[in-house]
Image (cartoon, coloured by chain):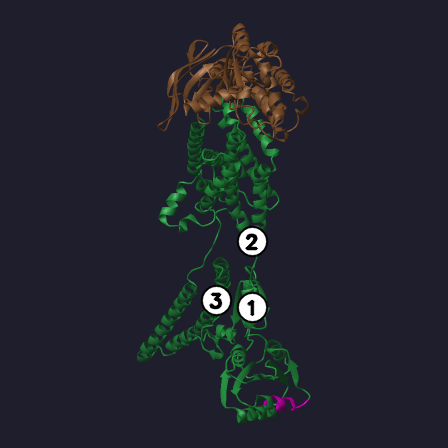
Chain colours: A brown, B green
């Protein structure tokens, strides 16, 4: 749906983006992760028409478009990092205002506003001024405001930043619903759990360049697989080798500790334990998280 | 312009739901109007002036003597022993008051044993007074005479005199005389009261010291001291009648106001006196022509003399030698009569060669209250226009909505246009209500109120434009308010609202010409106070619209540029 080719942006001689190539398919949830200053927000600003690129092109459904043109902007939605709404207007008034500004007629706008209030779980608070909402409610309102005009793709700029766990999970639920509707999602985040949970594909942006891209599993796989660590006395190597060979796993010993790695390890673990019955102690299953992968990747970069 | 109505409704809700904005943008200008209206509501009231009439009804004055002596206590004791009529007073003021009303005719003051001054008074005969004076001279190491009570009191306070002695002298000539002016007979005090009543509020004081005290406390704006013999000098013109005026120049405006008021009414007194004298001299000259009472002397008029000479000529028709001599006399009489008539006419014309006839270009006399309203409305336009323009735009940044709005389908100029329309409506409504209140409630004169509304609309564009420019440099409402005040405050002083433009240095006048508010004040003053038509203020109105267009374009450009 969206393809970015050789996109660069330079501010006062500083290169914020360096020839970025990305693609987001229709209905795909795409995540952009990277450290502070990597260029994530700059990329979103370019894609939402807030600033022009220095060079490169943006393709929408295969056609080159100018992100500054209204025709394109009507097909995108934006949820900024900080909740963006008028605090002294109610949720209903905020949504109705945007509906009017998107050119939706009064009758349709009313129906759309009620639907969004319900969708975001704000119908009970629809007539309270938004400044009195909790941070989670404010971010849900902000998300709903980005959807007033039914955009094809919605840009979420660190949407759960600063939210408590409950509010974060609540917002994830809404984003899941969006993904379920077949809408494309472009998410920037620091939260690897969020990226892992929401995104179909990820890209790691460092110093303005895309360093890696792929599914979360692929990213994690680049830095190693899940593993099991156990204490196993010497003399059981023959049986260990036999069961690992049968299950397609590999193992290594360091002193009394044996580490087993390989695909679908959680499913295969019971067979290993029953084969080595009575001799295994201190068994730990270690899952590689996206955060581990990201941190190791960043350390590797440094 | 799509979505403009929705944006205007939104902004209006933001204003009325935010107490700070409601106060700053809507209520505050009315509060200021109330304060300034109250300050100027009584403007034009008489200037409070203290009058100390030394030429008053008192029949005498105190002659003050101070002596240096070691026998002050002994002199005090001897004074007390002179009889039951000795009275004690709290201080000089009380003692002087008692003497002025004739309660006592002698005062003696000396430092008491506790260091305070003891003031004693008594009603004594001339012989008794002479005896006391002899006693004092016998004990005096040094003898001083003072022309005023204040000098004497200062001498005692500073230890230059040990004893003060005052005797009420009733021999001052020419006291409390009256002068006939404009159909009434006036003594000195009545003269000032009568001629000063239109512009001053005269309060009489018993002494100059008390009057000065009230001048220092701000209870009066000036002190007039009428010296002894003031009216006498005015009547006889033997000498210049001096009026002592004391002003407090720590407040130059107040001092200038008071001095101008005093000069105004004393000028009327002077003119009246000169006119009286002129008429008297002219009348005297005509007596020389017609005959009659010439300042107390019965004289035969020149016309009668001429008639007599004509009779004589006729009687001596047979004496040619006499005829020639009589003819010389007749000719002289006729010449002098003609010269006197010329002189009388000349005197009338030259004694008061200039008379001011002041009229207002508005066709009526304006009060300070009338004059301040155009500036007040202009300042309100500046305040609300600048703040409204700046705040309404910066709110979008503060709420994080600028980007969201930029993604909508609203028209390219909807955002700026909605701010402009709402701010103009607020400024216009506010100024219109202010104008209506000023006229209906405070009775302010507004010659052409409808045209004033046109000027108000034109002026509001410029001020809102300034606000938009400011909005380009602020991210939060608080910052926009501070910047707006920083920008507006100097403008107020550079536009002629406070200080007349004509009195400013040339370069400041050029700066003033670059400020739209200057034109707003000129145009509003023109249509409200001078009754000017649109054609008369076309230049100022055009300048306001040009400034408005320029500033709005610049503000829009800066705001849009910053958002990209």
Label 3: chain letter:
B
Q: Name the mark nearer the viewer: 2 or 1.
A: 1
- Mark 1: few/some/many CA within 10 Å (<14, 14-19, 20+): few
Q: State the SS at label 1.
A: helix
Q: Is residue B79 magenta?
A: yes
Residue A74 in sight:
no
Front residue of A264 and B549: A264
Distance from disc 2 to disc 1, alpha carbons, whole Å, reads 24 Å
Q: Which residues are magenta?
A: B75-83
**Where is residue B547 shown, x and y percent of the image?**
42, 35
Q: Which mark is residue B310?
A: none
Q: Name the mark nearer the viewer: 2 or 3.
A: 2
Q: Name the mark nearer the viewer: 1 or 3.
A: 1
| Magenta portion: prevailing SS class | helix
Front residue of A117 and A10: A10
Q: Which residue is mark 3?
A: B270
Pointer 2 or 1: first along the chain: 2
Q: Which residue is mark 2?
A: B43
Q: Are marks 2 and 3 on the same chain?
A: yes
- Mark 3: few/some/many CA within 10 Å (<14, 14-19, 20+): some
Q: Which residue is mark 1?
A: B213
Front residue of A67 and B251: A67
Q: Are marks 2 and 1 on the same chain?
A: yes
Pointer 1 or 3: first along the chain: 1
**Is residue A112 rendered to the left or right of residue B289?**
right
């Amino acid at each position: 749906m969206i393809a970015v080719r050789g996109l660069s942006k330079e501010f006062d001689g500083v290169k914020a983006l360096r020839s970025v190539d990305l693609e987001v398919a229709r209905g795909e949830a795409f995540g952009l992760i990277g450290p502070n200053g990597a260029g994530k927000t700059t990329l979103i600003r370019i894609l939402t028409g807030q600033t022009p690129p220095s060079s490169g092109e943006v393709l929408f459904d295969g056609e080159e478009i100018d992100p500054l043109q209204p025709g394109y902007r009507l097909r995108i939605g934006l949820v900024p990092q900080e909740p963006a709404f008028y605090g002294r207007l109610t949720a209903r008034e905020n949504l109705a205002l945007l509906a009017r500004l998107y050119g939706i007629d009064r009758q349709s706008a009313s129906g759309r506003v009620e639907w969004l209030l319900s969708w975001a779980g704000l119908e009970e608070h629809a007539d309270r001024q938004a400044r009195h909402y909790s941070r989670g409610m404010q971010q849900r309102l902000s998300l709903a405001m980005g959807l007033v005009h039914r955009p094809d793709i919605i840009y979420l700029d660190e949407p759960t930043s600063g939210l408590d766990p409950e509010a974060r999970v609540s917002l994830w639920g809404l984003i899941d619903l969006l993904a379920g509707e077949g809408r494309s999602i472009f998410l920037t985040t620091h939260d690897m759990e969020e990226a892992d949970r929401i995104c179909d594909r990820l890209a790691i942006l460092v110093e303005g360049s895309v360093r890696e891209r792929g599914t979360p599993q692929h990213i994690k796989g680049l830095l190693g697989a899940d593993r099991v660590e156990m204490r196993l006395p010497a003399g059981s190597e023959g049986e260990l080798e036999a069961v690992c060979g049968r299950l397609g796993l590999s193992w290594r010993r360091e002193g009394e500790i044996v580490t087993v790695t390989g695909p679908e390890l959680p499913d295969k673990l019971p067979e290993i334990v029953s084969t080595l019955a009575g001799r295994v102690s201190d068994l730990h299953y270690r899952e590689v998280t996206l955060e581990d992968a990201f941190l190791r990747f960043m350390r590797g970069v440094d | 312009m799509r979505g403009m109505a929705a944006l205007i409704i939104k902004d209006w809700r933001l204003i009325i739901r935010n107490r700070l904005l409601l106060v700053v943008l809507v209520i505050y200008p009315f509060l200021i109007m109330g304060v300034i209206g109250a300050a100027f509501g009584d403007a034009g009231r008489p200037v409070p002036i203290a009058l100390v009439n030394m030429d008053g009804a008192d029949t005498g004055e105190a002659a003050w003597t101070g002596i240096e002596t070691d026998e002050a206590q002994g002199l005090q004791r001897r004074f007390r022993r002179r009889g039951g009529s000795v009275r004690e007073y709290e201080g000089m003021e009380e003692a002087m008051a008692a003497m002025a009303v004739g309660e006592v005719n002698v005062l003696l003051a000396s430092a008491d044993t506790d260091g305070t001054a003891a003031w004693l008074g008594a009603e004594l005969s001339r012989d008794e007074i002479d005896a006391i004076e002899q006693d004092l001279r016998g004990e005096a190491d040094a003898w001083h005479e003072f022309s005023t009570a204040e000098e004497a009191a200062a001498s005692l306070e500073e230890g230059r005199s040990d004893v003060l002695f005052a005797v009420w002298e009733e021999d001052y000539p020419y006291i409390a005389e009256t002068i006939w002016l404009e159909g009434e007979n006036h003594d000195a005090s009545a003269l000032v009261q009568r001629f000063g009543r239109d512009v001053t509020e005269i309060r009489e004081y018993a002494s100059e010291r008390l009057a000065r005290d009230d001048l220092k406390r701000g209870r009066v704006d000036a002190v007039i001291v009428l010296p002894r013999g003031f009216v006498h000098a005015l009547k006889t013109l033997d000498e210049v009648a001096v009026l002592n005026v004391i002003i407090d120049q720590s407040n130059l405006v107040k001092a200038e106001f008071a001095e101008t008021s005093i000069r105004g009414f004393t000028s009327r007194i002077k003119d009246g006196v000169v006119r009286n004298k002129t008429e008297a001299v002219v009348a005297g000259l005509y007596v020389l022509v017609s005959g009659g009472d010439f300042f107390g002397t019965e004289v035969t008029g020149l016309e009668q003399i001429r008639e007599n000479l004509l009779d004589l000529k006729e009687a001596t028709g047979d004496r040619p030698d006499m005829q020639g001599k009589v003819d010389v006399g007749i000719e002289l009489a006729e010449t002098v009569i003609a010269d006197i008539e010329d002189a009388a006419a000349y005197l009338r014309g030259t004694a008061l060669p200039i008379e001011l006839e002041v009229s207002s270009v508005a066709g009526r006399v304006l009060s300070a209250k009338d004059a301040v309203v155009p500036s007040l409305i202009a300042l309100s336009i500046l305040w609300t226009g600048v703040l409204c323009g700046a705040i309404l735009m910066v709110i979008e940044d503060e709420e994080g909505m600028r980007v969201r709005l930029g993604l909508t389908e609203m028209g390219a100029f909807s955002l700026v246009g909605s701010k402009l329309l709402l701010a103009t409506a607020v400024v216009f409504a506010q100024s219109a209500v202010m104008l209506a209140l000023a006229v209906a409630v405070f009775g302010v004169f507004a010659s052409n109120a409808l045209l004033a509304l046109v000027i108000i609309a034109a002026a509001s564009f410029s001020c809102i434009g300034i606000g938009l420019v400011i909005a380009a440099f602020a991210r939060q409402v608080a910052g926009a308010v501070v910047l707006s005040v920083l920008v507006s405050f100097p403008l107020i002083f550079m536009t002629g609202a406070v200080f007349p433009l004509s009195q400013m240095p040339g370069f400041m006048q050029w700066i003033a010409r670059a400020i739209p508010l200057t034109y707003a004040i000129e145009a509003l003053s023109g249509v409200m106070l001078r009754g000017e038509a649109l054609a008369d203020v076309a230049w100022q109105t055009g300048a306001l619209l040009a400034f408005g267009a320029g500033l709005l374009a610049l503000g829009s450009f800066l705001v849009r540029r910053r958002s990209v």
